[in-house]
Amino acid sequence: MGILSGLRLYTAMARTTLQSRAIYRANFGLSLVFNSIMVTAELIVTLLLVHRVHGILGWNTAQVMLLFGMATTSGGTYRTFLSELSYFDKYLVNGEFDAVLTRPVPAWLAVAGRSVDPDQIGLVIEGMAIVAVSGTILGIFRLDAWLVIGELLAAVVSGTLIWMAMVTALAALGFWTTRVDTLQPMVLYGPQTAATFPLSVYPTDIRMLFYSIFPVAFGTYLPAMVILRKGPGAVMVLVSLFAAAAALALALRFWRFAVRHYTSTGT
Amino acid sequence: MSERTQTRSPIIVADNLEKTFFRGRGRKAVQIPAVKPLSLTVEPGEFIGFLGPNGAGKSTTIKMLIGILEPSGGTVHVDGLIPAKHRVHLALRLGVVFGQRTQLWWDLPLLESYRLLKVMYRVNEADYRRQMETLVELLDLSSFWHTPVRQLSLGQRMRGELAAALLHRPKILVLDEPTIGLDVTAKSDVRRFLLRENRERRTTIVLTTHDMSDVEELCTRIVVINQGIKMFDGTVNHLEERTGALSALHVTFQTTPLWDAINLPGIEHLSSDDDRSVLLHYNRRQFTPPQILEQIREAGRIEDFRMEEPRLELIMRTLYEGDGRLGE
């Protein structure tokens, strides 16, 4: 399937999904409030922690806040576009995946098409606000503002792709195990939370994991180092983008392999 | 049939198709053969019924034909394509209806589902309009066109599902228990529509069902599967010839009968609802009802009796409970 026809198909599916979600519109405001309370609470805990130890290995409170904002933005973006994949096991358990496979659409695209969830946009807005506030405190926009904004956008894209890759790989595991929900905190939320801190706080072997199996480093830490001018050159932003795209491509490959092992359910 | 389709190539060819599931892991893994080597050829325009008890392997076979499941062994070609490999491509030529599961958008009116299907199946505007007009008329969809699917009755929903499956004018229509749960009127609406689709448009239809009257009214051919094995492949009449013309007689006695006196050669004592009545199976060519009543008079005074009609149902039950002795 070509990229253009895939995009056309995705747009049509997303439109239908949005229409069907619009029926439960009251949820929107509610989840906006709920999300923002969650994010704020998490942010306060993180910042208190950093503040108490007077910064982490050369990262001050505002810098950690920027990292946190970047992670929240990309996490929100992923959730806006691919929320269903986090609960993908339900498709397998109740046999809904059968119906997905009868359509002339690649299975991943079909699930993505049902995943658009505007309720999650709140996370993106809050993440961006945190980035804006911390960035202003840090004065990163004072010189080369457009370059920095470009770098931030690229970081959000890589962060989103990394999330998508990880959640896709995890969903694919669901074709063999029904315990995806127990794995989820460990292999998905664990690394994502870890990525809201400067990775230099972790021992080397754990840090290596965040550059390989759980490649969250390319979504937050590495681009943040560039933006904060902590050493790596701007090229690392592109490297991160490339690594994130490669991770998603790999995850999709694994997904396709997994779909061929789908065993369906009895009726 | 064979004369008409002789020059065409078959639309479905399954050769020793097999599916084994694994339950558990490692050394404890148990192999469960769901479909044992099964071969099948379907010509274009056939209306073929898949029959078998629950867990017989019907759905598994169907799922391999439409590319949802990858076979463990053997080969299958549907309209020249390998389903599991060319699933997306094949889906464009298939219409699929699962009776137990909706394919429509639950919260939206039918119209919205069709609009999306139009894009999915790459149907152009003119074809879409023409086909939609026909379907709306034949399935009488207009009265609930704007109602969200979740508010439709089961009969209305099934009509909606059929229209969804046929929007892109597929060559093959696959129906998994399409009449399940429908009332008599809805069933006959669905059947009339399917017959027309098959006879007029020559759409090949593959159907699984537990409803024997579906089969008697619709199918030009039946395939009986039990425990993953094809036990019969042919017409309804052909099946009757093989199994004998089975009939059933339901007899109620005034008091508990002498059961021993009912054990007659050639008559199968099948079941009793209570201690006064009994269901007997016999071959119509061997006995007549008066003969049987005469023979079981010894057992007790007969209060009431009635003939049980659905012939095929009986044949099926004999097949399922048997050991495959009717197999080919």
Image: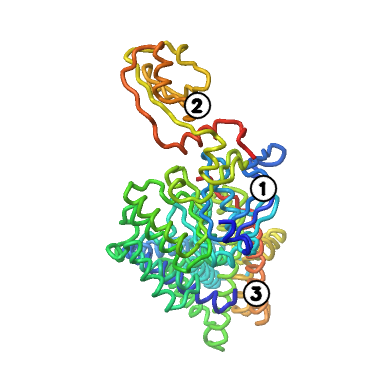
Question: Which three-letter amino acid code belongs to the residue tagged 3?
Answer: Ser
Q: Mark 2 belongs to which subunit?
A: B
Residue B308 seen in this snapshot: yes
Label 1 packing within 10 angstroms: few (<14), some (14-19), many (20+) = many
Mark 2 or mark 1, which is nearer to you?
A: 2
Question: Which three-letter amino acid code belongs to the residue tagged 1?
Answer: Glu
Distance CA(mark 2)–CA(mark 1) = 40 Å
The residue where tag 2 is placed is B286
Find numbered disc 3 in the image and state the secondary structure of the residue it sits on: helix
Question: Which three-letter amino acid code belongs to the residue tagged 2?
Answer: Gln
A264 left or right of B295 in image: right
Q: Quadrant of the N terminus of chain B?
A: bottom right
The residue where tag 3 is placed is A240
- From the viewer's side, name the closer residue of B238 and B275: B238
Residue B18's disc number: 1
Mark 3 or mark 1, which is nearer to you?
A: 1
B197 left or right of A50 in image: left
For the point 45% across and 15% down, the residue is B262
In terms of sequence position, does the residue under pointer 2 or pointer 1 come before the other? 1
The relative height of residue A219 versus residue A167 in the rendered view (above or below) is below
The relative height of residue B297 versus residue B327 in the rendered view (above or below) is above
- From the viewer's side, name the closer residue of A142 and A236: A236
Q: Residue A2's x, y, as percent?
A: 59, 77
Q: Residue A226's x, y, as percent?
A: 63, 78
Residues behind callouts 3 and 1 on a single chain: no
Q: Residue B167's x, y, as percent?
A: 44, 67
Disc 2 to disc 3: CB gap under 8 Å: no
Residues behind callouts 2 and 3 on a single chain: no
Q: Quadrant of the C terminus of chain B?
A: top right
- From the viewer's side, name the closer residue of A162 and B137: B137
